[in-house]
């Protein structure tokens, strides 16, 4: 009887994870004597993890996990180090703009792996760009998983339209390469030598400095809410999530209005997202959670000190970088780098985590490297909140939370080994933690030679 029950349980287990492995579930690789932080809940911490093929077989005690090993199993004693889900960066330009840091797309992936990143979204993919990415993937040159966002309009506002509909939404088009969604610019971004088009509504425009009014007083969103709604509706009807670039409260408002109207009161099953979200008025804040919109934010922001000091001089500074307000409102908030626009270090998830946790720190700014002093104490987050934004919440935005973002049996074996535990070190010391090893789908893609 007991054997029969066990057999049934093994068969059920098989459904979720280990079917192809045959009836004897043995591990190809075990990592033990570790601190395995699954990121499912703060107290879900284990000693070891077993991997079979490209999937996680089991997370548990060292004894349990070693019992899944046989003569062929590769065993790694981590020496008490910390294991987290591989970091997911849901807004980067690793494929299209790596040249800005003097790197090829292949070299940019190595940089990502050094920083524990196992999945990234590329948020600016043109028709040529997708062809290049598919070629790269087919040549076996993708070492990181990618979700591509295909552009409906350019950062200057030129419309490409729904060319993206020749692809299947959320489908894998080549090994490690998926279609993530559609990128839409509600405001102009980097465009020739013009300043980026941060649009403020009337009440905020009046709080800018005179110089700021000169720069931003006439900037309006690229599209009206009605025009943007048509684009969102068109993408939605074809099954594509959208990610809308919006920095100022004007851009944020048209984006919220457009998504709201396109949803017609229905649920946001496609997980439409808004990117940047730098200026959010009080009346706009609750709408993210109400509409279940994902806010993707970068903690290391283009915080040129002259920009804030001389141009914005907002009287109402509490509307800037409201990361904790967003999290506490119940919205889905994912944290990204937008790399390489920001500082070189901005790709580093631990650097970005520090920028969420420490006020007035250098990590929160770049440019002339003076602290901006713009992340007020009441917007600071905990390490747990920040890490969730870089793992599970980022996977949620990319529709990959069923297979990525936490360490659980049956999910893909994407993980990072760290020299110390980011949940317990002092925030000042987060950037001293070293990346030891990065694994994608059970393959050790990068290992720190120092360890
Ligand atoms: Zn971007």
Image (cartoon, rainbow, N blue to C red):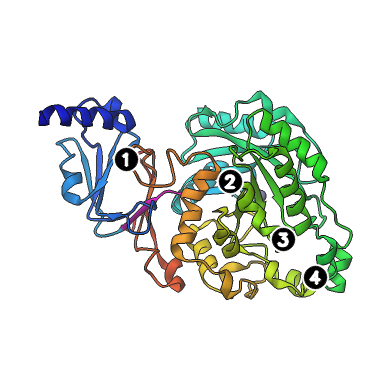
The CB of the residue at mark 3 lies under 8 Å from ligand 1: no
Q: Residues within 10 Å of mark 1 (few under 14, many from 20)?
A: many
Name the image quarter holding residue 201: bottom right
Disc 2, SS: loop
Residue 371 left/right relative to 281: left
Residue beneath label 1, please?
A: 409
- Res 157 seen here: no
Q: Is residue 264 above or below residue 171?
A: below
How many angstroms separate mark 3 from mark 1 (CA)?
42 Å
Residue beneath label 3, please?
A: 283
Q: What label does residue 102 carry, if any?
A: none
Residue beneath label 4, please?
A: 311
Tell me residue 20's x, y (percent): 29, 25
Near-viewer residue (236 or 407): 236
Residue 301 left/right relative to 234: left
Near-viewer residue (227 or 168): 227
Tell me residue 424's x, y (percent): 37, 68
Residue 158 left/right relative to 99: right
Q: Quadrant of the C terminus?
A: bottom left
Dot placed on the residue nearer the N-terminal end, 3 or 4: 3
Task: Say whether marks 4 and 1 touch (CB < 8 Å).
Answer: no
Tell me residue 178's x, y (percent): 54, 33
Q: Is residue 84 inside the magenta stretch?
A: yes
How many angstroms separate mark 3 from mark 2 (CA)?
35 Å
Disc 4, SS: helix
How many angstroms separate mark 1 from mark 2 (CA)?
30 Å
Disc 1, SS: loop
Q: Nearer the viewer, mark 1 or mark 2?
A: 1
Residue beneath label 2, please?
A: 94
Dot placed on the residue nearer the N-terminal end, 4 or 1: 4
């Amino acid at each position: 009887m007991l054997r029969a029950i066990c057999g049934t349980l093994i068969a059920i287990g098989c459904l979720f994870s280990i079917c192809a492995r045959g009836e004897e579930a043995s591990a190809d690789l075990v990592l033990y004597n570790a601190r395995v932080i699954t990121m499912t809940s703060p107290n879900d911490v284990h000693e070891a993890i077993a991997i079979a093929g490209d999937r996680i077989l089991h997370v548990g005690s060292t004894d349990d996990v070693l019992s899944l090993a046989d003569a062929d199993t590769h065993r790694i004693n981590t020496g008490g180090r910390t294991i987290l889900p591989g970091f997911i960066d849901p807004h980067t330009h690793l494929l299209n703009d790596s040249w800005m840091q003097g790197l090829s797309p292949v070299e940019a992936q190595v940089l990502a792996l050094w920083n524990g990143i196992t999945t990234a979204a590329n948020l600016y993919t043109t028709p040529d760009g997708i062809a290049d990415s598919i070629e790269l993937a087919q040549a076996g040159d993708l070492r990181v998983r990618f979700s591509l966002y295909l552009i409906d309009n350019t950062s200057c506002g030129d419309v490409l339209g729904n060319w993206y509909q020749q692809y299947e939404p959320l489908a894998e088009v080549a090994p490690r390469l998926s279609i993530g969604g559609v990128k839409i610019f509600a405001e102009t971004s980097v465009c020739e030598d013009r300043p980026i088009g941060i649009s403020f509504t009337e009440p905020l425009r009046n709080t800018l400095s005179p110089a700021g009014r000169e720069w931003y007083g006439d900037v309006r969103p690229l599209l009206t809410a009605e025009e943007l709604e048509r684009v969102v509706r068109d993408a939605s009807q074809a099954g594509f999530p959208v990610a809308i670039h919006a920095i100022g409260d004007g851009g944020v408002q048209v984006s919220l209005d457009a998504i709201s109207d396109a949803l017609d009161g229905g649920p946001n099953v496609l997980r439409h997202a808004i990117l940047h979200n730098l200026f959010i008025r009080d009346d706009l804040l609750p709408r993210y959670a109400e509409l279940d919109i994902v806010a993707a934010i970068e903690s290391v922001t283009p915080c040129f000190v002259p920009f804030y000091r001389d141009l914005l001089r907002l009287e109402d500074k509490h509307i800037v970088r409201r990361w904790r307000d967003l999290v506490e409102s119940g919205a889905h908030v994912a944290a990204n780098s937008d790399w390489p626009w920001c500082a070189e270090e901005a790709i580093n998830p631990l650097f970005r985590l520090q920028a969420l946790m420490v006020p007035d720190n250098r990590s929160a700014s770049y440019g002339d490297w003076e602290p901006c002093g713009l992340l007020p104490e009441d917007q600071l987050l905990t390490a747990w909140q920040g890490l969730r934004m870089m793992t599970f919440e980022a996977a949620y935005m990319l529709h990959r939370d069923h297979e990525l973002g936490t360490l659980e049996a049956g999910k893909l074996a994407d993980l990072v080994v760290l020299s110390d535990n980011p949940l317990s070190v002092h925030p000042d010391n987060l950037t001293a933690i070293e990346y030891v090893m990065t694994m994608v789908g059970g393959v050790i893609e990068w290992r720190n030679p120092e360890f």
